[in-house]
Amino acid sequence: MMVMKPVRAFSSAPALCYSRQQSFAQTSRGRQSWRRSQLMTRLWDSSNQEQQQSRPLSNQELVERRLAVNQAKRESRQRSVQERLDRNMKFKRLLHNDSTTNSDQESPFVVPPLYAVKIWVDIDLRQEMRLSGREKRGRVFLESGSKGVQTISGLHQELYGFFSALRKNTFLLSASVPPITADGKVESLPPKEGEAWTIETDDDVIATFQKADEFFHESAVKLQRPCIQINVLKNPNAPPPPPPPAYLEGMADPKQSETMTMLSFYAFPPQGIEDPEAFAFDIKKKWKPFGALGRVYVAHEGVNAQMSVPTNVLDNFMACCKIVPELGEHMENGINIDPQPLTMEEFQSAGTPVNQKPAPPFRNLHVRVRSQIVADGLDKSLDWQSAGYDMPPMEWHQKIKEARETKDTGDDTSSPIVLDCRNDYETEVGIFEGAEPLGTENFRDSWDVLKDRLKDAPKDAPIMTYCTGGIRCVKVGAYLTQEMGFTNVSRLAGGIIAYDRTLTEKTEDEESMFKGTNFVFDGRMGREITDDTLGTCATCGTKTNLVSNCHNENCHKRMIQCADCRTNYHGTCSHACKTIVIKGQAKTEEGSTFSETASETSSKTFESIDDYSVGHSTPAPSVYAEMEHNTRAHMPTGAHMVSGATQGRILAQLASMTREGRILELGTFTGYATVCFLEGARNVGQITGVANGNIHSGPYVMSLERDVRAFNIAAAHVQAVGEKGLGVEAAELVCAIRNQEVPSVDGDFVSSSLDGIAGCDLLRVTDALATVEEIASGNGSLNPAPFDLVFVDADKTRLLDYVDACLSNDRLLNKGGFIVVDNVLWKGLVVEASNGSFSSVADSPDDDKNLVKKNRRARKLANQMHDFNSCIVKDDRVEVVLFPVRDGLSVIRKK
């Protein structure tokens, strides 16, 4: 047995090679896992042999098989982890026991059960394998009596585990006695000429460790255990490593690509795919270097792929596909490429939103085995090589134009029958002029519709069919020619995708005969070809071309829904599904167990440190998201001023940590931060047992706002929370505000409370600073008890005046209380302000006076923010911490 030197008494690190655990798992254990999965597949196949002889496996059976294989892999990994833990504990005991034996001067001197081995690798092999520092200075342990100290194959196996890049027959082994320092430290140095002996046989291995025993007994320096040096030398007669595939030569780094290209293709190889499982594994391995993403289906009949590939390696990807026998010339019409690549920023938000957040069209590369690459529902498989005429896009374009002109003249008897072979939700948002949609909900429903539509058509009638990428028309064409006997069947080569690309590339001013949006099978759910809005929102009836799936996982209905309804209904199709989604969010917020939450978080992927931070923070109640949506709907130009989830959670936490939960907010806006403070004040009241907070005592929030419209929206939000709390009912009540006129508040004062614990007063004022100074002086009409926290999100030009009013005495802010000032980084421009090196369009000629004015204002405010930050940090009355959260929060503690 071979292990690396333990760290911290053999913690949970694996015993073989701590620094290379992941690489080893990807090589040795990865191969073992693949072999196990293949064995499980064969076992599953053999147990269902009778079924397979009579019919192909269904999709459900294929999924069950994949789940069985994955379960076997998981169990194998769990066994491997347990075996490593057991080995670790065993070696921990061995190390402890042999050190105890040597420290006991009266006990007999015995050989400890572990060998310490220094591994030295020659320079050529180091460079070839690109070893890590730990591998270059490798110190490992071998257990006495293990195969690693008795056989050459055992020693080789341990070396393969230690060096992840070591290839069979590329190295030679020798051994030598390691140099020992005066204090008993074993060094790793190149063997001196004539002092090393080769290791080629089992006898050589046994003799090597016998010499280690002898050296242990005879060494003038006391050693803890026998030691030896194994030298790994490059084999001069080793075959050269296989060259990389030609399609990878000179390939750019896909991570450096500025754009992503969306593409699709399909193939019906005449011989079919003999082993879909092996083929799926092979192409996924081949495509890994390209950074390709997408969804690929593999079946005995062929391959169907919708993918995205970094544009700078697109040619390499296409070259790779061409050398795959099952693809190559059998990719009908080649690879369908969208005419316009997406920038990386566009790609990240091109998909339909998930939980109201932008999403890419694809997140990963999934290659799935299916019973069919397009489920057709036919009783038998047809000859997909005989499916009618594959009409080039420009010929198709001309035919459709001629059919339109003929129809305009009133003589359309000779016009072809143009059939849209897609489903109803696809044809509703985009269609060729003059085409007839089949109106099916699923493709497998097409056959009865075709029989009914063409029952009276002559067998030589010209029939033109089309779909998204062409694959469904292959099956329709085969059915029309082979089952229904039609002799003049054609289909659009490459489908709408190829038509769009060809028309864009070959013509400039030619009118597209396809109108509207082409539905595509990725996260985008559609690519706009013309600006015609043909679809009807299933929720409100307005015209739209947006297609999405209901976010209620138990519904997942595909629907046409406008952007407003998608937001208002949380991406669901109805009030019922919306309620289920909101309740599910509330359950996650309030009732998830630790194991459930940990499992969900560990399965997520994060694209930035901000996403990771949000993903590992307790989510805010859903009512806050509804307040954000309302702000965007009613005050779109100021929507960026909402605190947002991260800052809002920080404000709620700060309020929860105050002494009595008394908060003064300067700048209510639409009430997002106000409710955060109210939530924190409520938490304080729950802990202290104080309820019915008000202006004179207990948990309480006072908020001052100048803008009338913002004040009305904030009042509606705070009153909804006061009436329904922070749960699902509050979220629904706040959501209802979105599609109606916000009621005006009579007067300048609104009062509410949360759960009968924390009180809240909203005040509309003309000058917040004057009100604050009145409170501090004790001479105004307001005479509240002192506050524990003052949040300043008001006039940025008078921040020092606000802070000075809080510090002048203890009427406004308690000693030890906090002042929190927002926007102290001012979009990052304070750095340039501190350096005096603004580089702004305001410094250069520009015809857009509004833009110049805007940038001058930004520069002015950045200078004022920098002056504030510089002054307050020098004030002896306070202690300051500036957090680079969002636009910057300065937390100032009053001494």
Image (tube, rainbow, N blue to C red):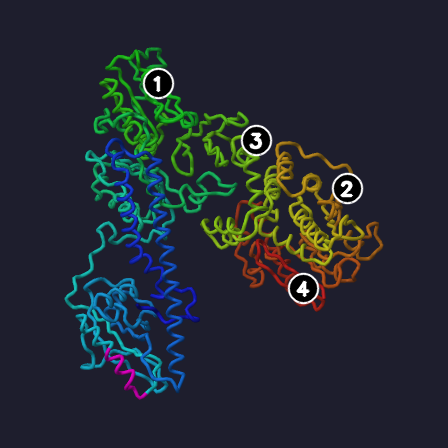
Q: Residues within 10 Å of mark 1 (few under 14, many from 20)?
A: some
**C-alpha distance separating marks 2 and 1:** 65 Å
* Residue hosting label 3: 575
User: In x, y percent, where is residue 283?
Assistant: 27, 45
In the image, what residue occupies the spot 74% across and 50% down?
700
Res 748 label: 2
The magenta span reads 210-220
**C-alpha distance separating marks 3 and 4:** 51 Å
Residue type, label 1? Arg
* Residue hosting label 4: 872
Q: Nearer the viewer, mark 4 or mark 2?
A: 2
**C-alpha distance separating marks 2 and 3:** 35 Å
Q: Is residue 774 left or right of residue 816?
A: right
- Label 1 secondary element: helix
Q: Earlier in the sequence, mark 1 or mark 3?
A: 1
Q: Residues within 10 Å of mark 2 (few under 14, many from 20)?
A: some
Q: Earlier in the sequence, mark 2 or mark 1?
A: 1
User: In x, y percent, where is residue 772?
Assistant: 77, 54
In the figure, 40 relative to 514: above or below?
below
User: In x, y percent, where is residue 251?
Assistant: 28, 52
* Image quadrant in which you'd find residue 216: bottom left
- Circles 1 and 4 in contact, beta carbons < 8 Å: no
